[in-house]
Image: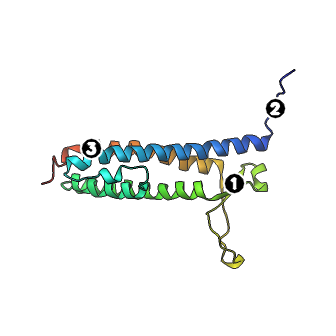
Amino acid sequence: MQKKTYRLRPEDKFTSKFYGLLGRLVHAHAQLDFNVGLQLNWMGPHLGHDVSGLLQRTIPFARRLTKLEELTADLFVNSEAALVELKDWFKEAARLKQVRNDYVHGRWGVPRSAFENPPRIEFVPLHWTMDVDALEPPSVMTIDELEQEVAALQHLAGEYFRLTRKHERWAVSRLA
């Protein structure tokens, strides 16, 4: 029996790329969460804080991120420049956390514009609103715009380490 070969239609290639990007977004967030946990794991004891309760799978990422922000502020208390740059990092991390949550739990559609150039996709955050007048219109974006969000999330963890290395001379050795 001869094996059947299938060809991807143009819309299948678009859908494949879209789902690949969504998978990369999920993976990048998981890597970021892991790195935040590693930072908490050393920074908590280093600064005399018990963070063990935050290092469990059932604890939301947002709680780990908030605690890391607090500990980072304690670690770099002697450097206003470090605190400003790291505050911006945490603001971006919170924004991208929300992007990831929305994109993973929301609804995606491929409108007719997906077959135009450039292709576009529609996104609607998860909700159960039945009042048509209260509905927000879907967000429409290109694959390139989604790819930029994925790249930003992938870049985020490395940026944290770059900033902490840049300002490490100001880090306190241990809080009393």
Q: Residues within 10 Å of mark 2 (few under 14, many from 20)?
A: few
* Secondary-structure class at tag 2: loop
Query: Residue 126, how many percent across, how many down?
Result: 62, 64
Question: Residue shown at 83%/24% (left/top)?
Answer: 3
Question: Residue shown at 69%/54% (left/top)?
Answer: 121
> From the image, which quarter does the C terminus lie in?
bottom left
Disc 3 target residue: 42
Question: Residue shown at 78%/41% (left/top)?
Answer: 10
- Calculate the distance from the C-alpha at mark 1 to the C-alpha at mark 3: 42 Å
Query: Residue 42, how many percent across, how many down?
Result: 26, 44
Query: Residue 156, how many percent across, how many down?
Result: 43, 47
Q: Of the two numbered discs 2 and 1 on the same chain, state the one appearing first in sequence.
A: 2
> Is 86 on the left-hand or right-hand side of 95?
left
* Secondary-structure class at tag 1: strand
Query: Residue 146, how many percent across, how many down?
Result: 60, 50
The amino acid type, in three-letter code, at marker 3 is Trp
The answer to whether one can see residue 44 in this image is yes
Q: Of the two numbered discs 1 and 3 on the same chain, state the one appearing first in sequence.
A: 3
The amino acid type, in three-letter code, at marker 1 is Ile
Disc 2 target residue: 6
The amino acid type, in three-letter code, at marker 2 is Tyr
- Calculate the distance from the C-alpha at mark 2 to the C-alpha at mark 1: 25 Å
Question: Residue shown at 36%/46% (left/top)?
Answer: 37
Disc 1 target residue: 121
- Calculate the distance from the C-alpha at mark 3 to the C-alpha at mark 2: 51 Å
Closer to us: 83 or 133:
133
* Secondary-structure class at tag 3: helix
The answer to whether one can see residue 116 in this image is no
